[in-house]
Image (cartoon, helix red, strand yellow):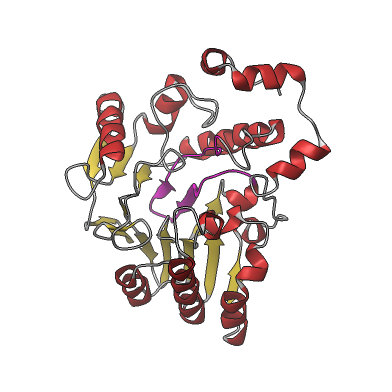
Amino acid sequence: MRVIILAEESLGVRSMATFIETPDISVLLDAGVSLAPLRYGLPPHPVEFKAVKEARERILEYASQADIVTISHYHLDHYTPPFTSWFEWTNEEIFREVYEGKIVLIKSPEANINPRQLRRAHSFLKAVKDLAKEVVFCDGKKFKFLATDIEFSEPLPHGRDDSKLGWVLVTSIKYGKEEVVYAPDVQGPISQKTLDYILKTKADLLIIGGPPLYLVGHKDSMNEVCIGMKNLAEIAKKIPVTIIAHHLLRLKEWEEKSEEVLVSARERKHLAITAAQYMGFKNRLLEAFRKELYEREPPSESFLKWVKNKAERISEPPPI
């Protein structure tokens, strides 16, 4: 199988967009990308807008090759919405390019979904129904494309079991003796149910959303994050290659805080690495270092005017 991670925090943006190709089928997982509207009280730096533009271009390049596009849940960094937003670097034309003519396998809006994601799902379905080749609710389902098997979990919690952030689907793609598991936004996982599900797979490669260390004291407790880290260390012992992604990479000190995970992998001669490292690049944690970006490269007056003007932010792209 060919696995290409297109966008992710270690590549400068919020995303887990991934392209997986077997001899039978090509799949674009979670074709979304986004920037945090505020971090350290600051909007995204121009360098971040350049990164989201480049990430969107990569997503479009691989969308043109994909037979299938999936949606694990309806957060804006995990799907392409049908409206204009430069924080996601999208508009109606880009939406069409991503989903037109595709088999679209999506999380069902009919159960295990919170109100905000339900509204987004309905808007998405209304816009995509006449574009896609087929739209299928895939919660807990298995699909076979010649010798390739694609399996979706039942909805699993977005973090802890009682998370208000909703539910997500974990995807497994199997070809021959290879299995890649894609576990977005499980936040460690924190949930024992999610941990058990992942450990039961026979994954050679796991792409997983790590614990949200940057939210400790705000939305998540230290105890929950520690559980997520402990569970991630257990996973790293079992799975040969674990790509640590997403929420964990929003903290500057992610590597220092992940020592337990990295040691667990090394002891078994496994790999626990970032998406950037997997793709052969240096880590580029732009959001985590947003404050330093503003200090080192102060934005232009025209950019600051644009970012403060909500109407202009919709009608015109940022002056970068």
Label the magenta part by its dominant secondary structure: loop
Residue at the image position 55 percent from the left and 52 percent from the top: 4
Which image quarter holds the C terminus? top right
Q: Residue extending furthest front?
A: 217
Q: Position of residue 252 (x, y in %)?
A: 67, 57
Residue 34, magenta (yes or no): yes
Q: Residue extending furthest right?
A: 296
Q: Residue extending furthest left?
A: 110
Q: Position of residue 158 (x, y in %)?
A: 36, 56
123 and 45: which one is in front? 45
Residue 172, magenta (yes or no): no
Residue at the image position 36 percent from the left and 72 percent from the top: 195
Which region shows up in magenta?
12-37
Rendered view: 22 above or below 56:
below
156 and 215: which one is in front? 215
- Asked if one can make out residue 299 in the rendered structure from this viewpoint, the answer is yes
Image quadrant assignment for residue 117: top left
Image quadrant assignment for residue 39: top right
Q: Is residue 85 left or right of residue 285?
A: left
277 and 25: which one is in front? 277
Q: Where is residue 148 in the image (x, y as percent from the top left)?
A: 34, 59
Residue at the image position 63 percent from the left and 53 percent from the top: 10
Image quadrant assignment for residue 44: top right
Q: Where is residue 317 in the image (x, y as percent from the top left)?
A: 60, 19
Rendered view: 147 above or below 121:
below
- Asked if one can make out residue 319 in the rendered structure from this viewpoint, the answer is no
Residue at the image position 67 percent from the left and 50 percent from the top: 285
